[in-house]
Amino acid sequence: MKINTNVFDYIPVTGRFVISLIREVGAVFVFFYRGFVHIFSFPWQIFKIVSQIYFIGTKSIVIVGLTGTFTGMVLGMQGYYSLVRFGAEGMLGAVVALSLIMELGPVLAAIMVVGRAGSAIAAEIGIMRISEQIDALETMDINPIRFLVSPKLAAAMISLPLLTALFDVMGIIGGYLTGSVLLGVSPGIFFSCMESTVMFSDVAGGFYKAFAFGIILTVISCYKGFYVHKRPDGFGAKGVSTATTSAVVLSSVFILVVDYILTSFLI
Amino acid sequence: MPVPLIEFIDIYKGFDNNKVLKGVTFNIYSGQITSIIGKSGIGKSVLLKHIIGLMIPDRGDILFQGKSIRKMKKSELSKLKNKISYMFQSAALFDSMTVIENISLPLIEKSKFSKSKIKQKVRERMNQLDLYGIDNKYPAQLSGGMKKRVALARALVTGPEIILFDEPTTGLDPIRKNSVHSMISDYQTRLGFTAILVSHEIPDVFYISQRIVMLDAGKIIFQGSYREILRSKDQQVLDFITGSQKKPDGMTGLVGHSIGNKRIYEEKERLGRHGIPFSLIMFTVRNFDEINDRFGFTAGQTALKHISVQVEKYLRINDCSCRNSKDSVLLILSHTNIEDAKKVFSKLVKIFADSGTKNILPDYSFCLEMSGKVIEINSEMVINEIIEGNAGWENMDSQFNLCYERG
């Protein structure tokens, strides 16, 4: 009897959790919709978008390039020692390229951008919220979502595929360095195998993912900062810090979850 | 009766279990400065945020020119917002933008002016507010007073019809406070906008406001003009206004001379700025030492307290009485010229004479030998010299005795 009572006690708690989860997901989608629509509303915010491309994209080049190079180098090394057991080291170029283009490139590039730009976006908008700067925009009849979120969203949608391309190229170069230069796989075999295996659909699939990850990381980071004042677990500076952490963690998790879903559709 | 510009009708607003506004109803009229006063944390800023749509009431309605803000279409609401500027308590400047970018932002985003026209308008406002040499500074590099002025410039740059000021003088020194108040008053006179001011600066805001609204315990407990608030009999209103001006000592009920001096300087500044006259009356107990020697310290203090009670009963809220020295009481009469001050003096002498003096000091009988003098202050006078000396004072004829009889 006692056990039954406890089970019933969990029902309203679970119900409340599910309702709040649905409400939160709905709010995020509405937030994304409003941000997306205002990218195309007149007057266009070209300069703001370019400035955000510089912040999200250009400033991430070094970190994405480095990560790509070392990921490719590790892939090259691991791949070589795995393939050589089967005498299939000639396939190294294809293994490195497909791994990078289809999975590691978009995912790792996006996670790097989350760490570098997503956290900064959440903190910037969060501070603007707690210091009434967003309220100030509203009093001036300036739509804060259009002003703050739309340029970042557009910039991320443009930057992420380009950063992914960079990641892929640097990764392939890294794989070539370890596979061919260090471990002796013929460069001709490395690149010709890659060329014959990698299809355009693989490359396009990687870019679709990068595009989706750009939206995810920007929307979550902006949303967390924008509604920092509604967080139950902290106000002021503490609220901004928890919102930033939560933006980074949630974006990373969602990128991996969405990666799985997209892969299952694209493969 | 003029038609109200903004009407608050039975507004309720709460945050979780904290009910901040409980049926607020009041009006704001066009072309006036309306000050909303009240204790800290009572919901004045919450009230202000409802006007511009930053907060939505839980119940009740807000009408703008007779039309419900809640029922306005998006385009109408946008039009309304374009008529209003809001100056935040914290200034709310965009900290990643320079001063010039902050001030020009509303014009860049919402107007169709050319770049050069925007630049010209921004420069005009900056010059009017003495904002020189800070164009490329960031808000973090500015002092509190400077930030307020930049925020004011941003609020004024669009030429709004209504400006909402949320505690514009918080954190400023007295000189800056006065300059912000005079700036608001001057611009309101010159540009004719409607100003709604949330402030604690009493009585300073009274002098620049045509209308005063007082909020307490979630309700409006007073709305009316400066003169009406001075005549108010509501104890809560009186307590707030007098309490914010005076901290009397327990022995005599009079504030100290330092508070009195501060008040005189404030009045003198108002005289210089707005030409509002003020006068002083000084009552001196000539045999105060003798009474203390013969009947003890308490006797003299009790007698002074009796005088202060009679004086306080007669003075208006914006007047002030203080203990100028051990044997003299100074009265600061705001908005009063010398002729009126003489009338006040005569009236007080009569009040002293008529007041029952029996049983106040049950163990002693003695008479206070009193004298008095009056002066109307002009802007050339040196206050310290006046208070300490006799120069400029007009001695009143009536030297009189105030006698206390044993009960």
Image (cartoon, rainbow, N blue to C red):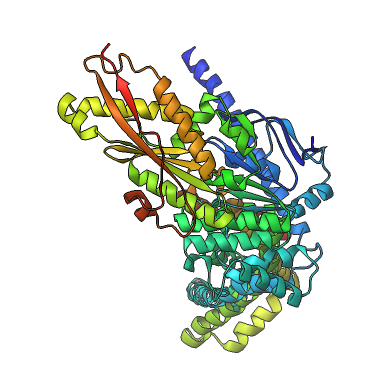
In this figure, what is the number of numbered marks?
A: 0
Find residue B216 and report its image quarter: top right
Query: What residue lies at 24% left-to-right and 33% top-to-bottom?
Result: B288
Query: What residue lies at 26% left-to-right and 38% top-to-bottom?
Result: B326
Query: What residue lies at 61% left-to-right and 77% top-to-bottom?
Result: A166
Residue A54 seen:
yes
Find residue B212 and report its image quarter: top right
- Between A231 and B101, which is closer to the camera in this rendering? B101
Q: Is B150 on the left-hand or right-hand side of B305?
A: right
Q: Position of residue A235 (x, y in %)?
A: 49, 45
Q: Is A207 on the left-hand or right-hand side of B216?
A: right
Q: Position of residue B9 (x, y in %)?
A: 73, 30
- Between A199 and B83, which is closer to the camera in this rendering? B83
Q: Is A174 on the left-hand or right-hand side of B75?
A: left
Q: Position of residue B54 (x, y in %)?
A: 67, 45
In this rendering, is residue A196 above or below B276? below
